[in-house]
Amino acid sequence: MNELKQSKYIDITTDYGFKKVFGSDTNKDLLIAFLNELFRGRKIIADLYYNKNEHVGDTEDIGTVIFDLTCTADNGERFIIEVQRTAQDNLKKRMLYYSSKLIADQAPKGNRRAWNYAISEVYIIVLMDGFAMPDAGDEQYFLHDICLCYRDHGKIFYDDLGFIYVELVNFVKAEAELVNDLDRWLYVLKNMSSLNGLSTYLRKPIFEKLFQLAEYSKLKPEEREMYNVSLRNKWDAESIRSSQEEQLKRAREKAMAEGKAEGKAEGKAEGKAEGKAEVIKNLLSSNKFSISEIAELADVTVEFVKQIEAEKAKGK
């Protein structure tokens, strides 16, 4: 396989680059530093060790789950760190399932009473490369820190299960705008392969080690081969995602035009909404849009879309 035209540093959001930087015991100080910044002082990880990343299903139907990275902190906290490159409708559910695997695997085969549900803290870290959080709307947050809390007043209900989603697409700071180490980590995650060296904004021992480790010229021939394959896979994923986004854009434009045409057929506001019922049913049937997206496309309320969805489910 011919080598690709390479930048000075590897892309650390590729499968190979991510595991090269964060996935080995000799470089676990990099992962510890990154995780500590993600928790923003809420917890401090002093040490960790790597677990197997393959979890066999409980039955033949469930199959095997393979995570990007799994590790356990010195106090028993467990982490899954995943890199996702394509938007998925079931992303949140899949990450919830992953967390349930880490929880369920802690149960002993016997003597459950003595165990007394001594479940360790479990955290899922998701680095989203190139796409936004599902149902995010117009929000431009790059960090989503999620826990179980009361719906009415927001007080934390259970603090030992958490999800941190990082939307790299929404992190748009330039080097001169980096104000803390979390900024610096997200900046290098997003831009490493386009950088030419370690700038003054990144001059810290932990980033000096990162840049030395990520230098393409220092990879062995077999490492370069694995990285090149990984980079091609990322480019393929980006191409597929770009094509899907273009198709979605066209579908939205078509739906918007149809929605406007339906709306013009009725004179009253209520009549406009009723006239869009068929369009809304078609959008629901496509399984490509969220409830909020359909409401925006058809220029109706979310409640009206839910009403049509309920009627559709009843066969009306």
Image (cartoon, rainbow, N blue to C red):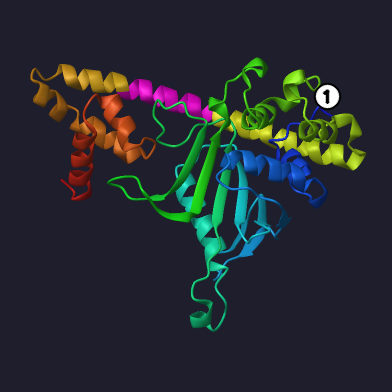
Residue at the image position 20 percent from the left and 37 percent from the top: 303
Classify the position of the C terminus by image quarter: top left
Could you say where residue 279 lies in the image, as x and y percent from the top left? 24, 30
Residue at the image position 44 percent from the left and 28 percent from the top: 248
Q: Amino acid at mark 1?
A: Lys
- In the foreground, 115 or 241: 115
Q: Is residue 204 left or right of residue 137?
A: right
Classify the position of the N terminus by image quarter: top right
**Looking at the image, is 96 positioned above or below residue 105?**
above
Q: Is residue 252 left or right of residue 236?
A: left
- The secondary structure type at the circle numbered 1 is loop
**Looking at the image, is 103 positioned above or below residue 140?**
below
| Extreme residue in the left direction | 268
- In the foreground, 163 or 297: 163
Could you say where residue 84 lies in the image, as x and y percent from the top left? 59, 40
Residue 259, located in which quarter of the rendered image? top left
Which residues make up the magenta segment?
Answer: 243-255
Residue 158, located in which quarter of the rendered image? bottom left
Q: Can residue 61 be seen by looking at this rendering?
A: no
| Extreme residue in the bottom direction | 111
Q: Is residue 82 left or right of residue 14?
A: left
Could you say where residue 219 lies in the image, as x and y percent from the top left? 88, 36
Q: Can residue 300 be seen by looking at this rendering?
A: yes
Q: Which residue is mark 1?
A: 8
